[in-house]
Image (cartoon, coloured by chain):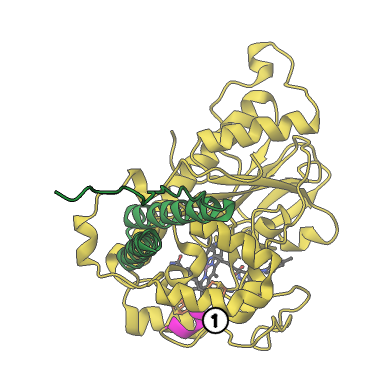
Chain colours: A yellow, B green
Amino acid sequence: MLAGKKFLGPQTAPTPESRGVPKWTGTPEEASKMLRAAMRHFSAANCGFTVLDENTSKLIYSKDPDGKELIFTDEVKASETDKQRFIPKSCKCVMAYTVQMSPETMRRSPTMTGGQTTTLAYKRAENIQASVQEFLRGLGYQGLGESSTNALGIAPAFGVLTGLGEMSRLNRMISPEFGPMVRVFKLLMDLPVAVDKPIDAGIMAFCKACKKCAEACLSQSLSLTPSPPGRCEARGTTGHKAYFEDSVSCMTSWREKATTNCGICFGVCPFAKKDKAWIHEMVKVGMSVAPFADSFFRSMDDAFGYGAQASGESWWNLDLPEYGIDSSQPVGAV
Amino acid sequence: MAQQVVSKKDYIEIRKRPWYVYVIGLLWIGLIGFLAQNAAASAQELEPRAAMVFWVSAAVVLLAGVVIAFLRSRK
Ligand code: B12
Ligand code: SF4
Ligand code: SF4
C-alpha cells in the first residue's frame, strides 16, 4: 500500500461517483462491524469509536506538527491550504485504533533494538491509515488522518474514550489484550458508526499497588503517588484522571543517558507480558474482582521474573513471528 | 506323620475408597495439568524464569501425590 501520512489520504481509490454507483449505506452498527473487520485486515490490533462533541473536540490539536492550524468548518468537504487544514463538522465520528509493538524488542530498551520498536509500528500505522482512508473513499466517505505521525489529536485520550484501554501510571493507555504494547492512532470520519464506551478492567486500579514502571524509570519521570492526582503541576493540565509524568526529564534522559528513545517503563509493566499461559487470564480476572490482592499479584510478577529487561544481543537468537507480534490474539470488541 | 488341621480362615478385605479420594485425585491431575500448561506456555512466551518455577512446581506436586498415594497404600 501507499506509505506516508496525509490528512486527506492518498485520494487514489475510485469513488462511488466515479464508478456511477450510489455510496455505501447501512446502519451505524453495520458500519462499525465492517470497519473493525477491515482494520484487523489492515493489521490494526483493535479499533473503537466515539463522536466529537463540545468536550471531546478539545482533544483535537489546534495546530498540527507542521504548524498548520486545524479548523472545524461547516463545509462538507475537507480541505487544506498552506497554513490550514479544514475539518468538516460532519466528520465528527472518531475511530481510534491500536497497532501492536513487539514486546521482545521493547523489553530491550534503551538500545537500538528497543528504539526501532517505535519506528516499525509507525511505519505499519502509515499503511493502515492510508488503507482505511482509501477504503472509506471507495465507500463514498471521508477519512481524515494524521498529516504526519502523531498529528491531529491526543491519541491515548481517544483510545480511552473508545474503550480500547485505560489510562495508567505510564500516563499512557494500557489495553486489556495487549497491555501497553500498542501505539494508538486516530481518524475522523463522516461515516456514522455505533460508538463504544470507556472500559474499567481494573488496570488503573492495579497501578495504585504496582509502581513497577516508576521504579524502573531511568530518570524517575513517572509519578509514585498512590492515586492519580488529576492535575499536572508542571504543565498545568487538568480535567482528566491521570498520573502525569515529567516529560522533560524523560526526554532529557533519552538524549543524555539512553542515547536512543526509551520504553523501559513499557517493557517492565505486568500487562506487557504475552497471553499464552492460563495464569495470566486468572490474574486478570482476580485483579478486576479482588483489587485488595493487587500488591500480591505485583510481588508474584517480580518473583516469576516477568518484565525483566533483556540484552539487545540476545534478541538476534530468538525465533519470533512476523513483526515480533502475536497477531492471533483475540480482542474483546471484535 | 502328624495330621495337619486347617482351622485358619483367610480373608481378603476389599476396602472401597471414599468419594473424596477420587475428587482429590482429579484435583491433583488438574493442578499438574495447569502447572504444566503454564510452564510450557511461559517457555513459548520467552519467560525462562516463570517456565522454570512452573516446571518445578509441577514436579513437586506430582512427586508429593505419588508419595502420599504410596504411603496410603501401605497402610
Ligand atoms: C509528546 C509525546 C511524548 C513526550 C511527552 C509526553 C507528554 N505527556 O506530553 C515524551 C517524549 C516524554 C513521550 C514519551 C513516550 N511516549 Co509519547 N507521545 C507524545 C505524543 C506525540 C503527544 C502527546 C501529547 O499531546 N502530550 C501533551 C499533553 C496532552 O500531555 P498530558 O497532559 O500529559 O496528557 C497525556 C495523558 O494524560 C493523556 N491525556 C491527555 N488528555 C486526556 C484526556 C482524557 C479524557 C484522557 C482519558 C487522557 C488524556 O494523553 C497524553 C499522552 O501523553 C503522543 C502521540 C499523540 N498524538 O497522542 C505520543 C504517545 C503518547 N507516546 C507514546 C509512547 C509509546 C511513548 C514512549 C514509550 C516512547 C516510545 N518508545 O515509544 C514514552 C513513554 C514515556 C512515559 N511513560 O511517560 C504512545 C503511547 C501509546 C499508548 N499505549 O498509550 C503515543 C500515543 C504515540 C503513539 N502514536 O502511539 N511521548
Ligand atoms: S520512556 Fe524511559 S525515561 Fe521516559 S518515563 Fe519511560 S522509562 Fe522513564
Ligand atoms: S508497571 Fe504497574 S504501575 Fe506501571 S503502568 Fe504497568 S501496571 Fe501500572
Q: Which residue is mark 1?
A: A211
Name the quarter where the N terminus of chain A is drawn. top left
Nearest to the observer: residue A135 or residue A112 = A112
Image-based side of A234 in relation to A298, left or right = right
Reply above or below: A277 against A214: above
**What is the chain letter for disc 1?**
A
**Is A233 situated above or below A176?**
below
Q: From the Cβ of disc 1, is ligand 3 less than 8 Å away? A: yes
Image quadrant containing the C terminus of chain A: top right
Residue A212 place in picture, x, y as percent? 49, 79
Whether residue A216 is in magenta: the answer is yes
* Residue at disc 1, secondary structure: loop
Q: Residue at x 69, y 25 (%)?
A: A140
Taking the image as shown, residue A208 lies to the left or right of residue A118, namely right
Where residue A59 appears, x then y in whole percent? 72, 62
Determine the image quadrant of residue A91: top right
Q: Is residue A204 left or right of residue A54?
A: left
Residue in front for this viewpoint, A20 or B62: B62
Magenta-colored segment: predominant secondary structure: helix
**Residue A64 in sight:** no
Residue B25, image x, y percentages: 48, 53
The span shown in magenta is: A212-217
Identify which residue is drawn at 34% across, 84% down: A256
Q: Quadrant of ligand 3?
A: bottom right
Task: Let me know if residue A9 is in the magenta part.
Answer: no
Residues A266 and A257: in front is: A266
Query: Disc 1 residue type?
Result: Lys
* Residue A110 spot, x, y in % from top left: 33, 73
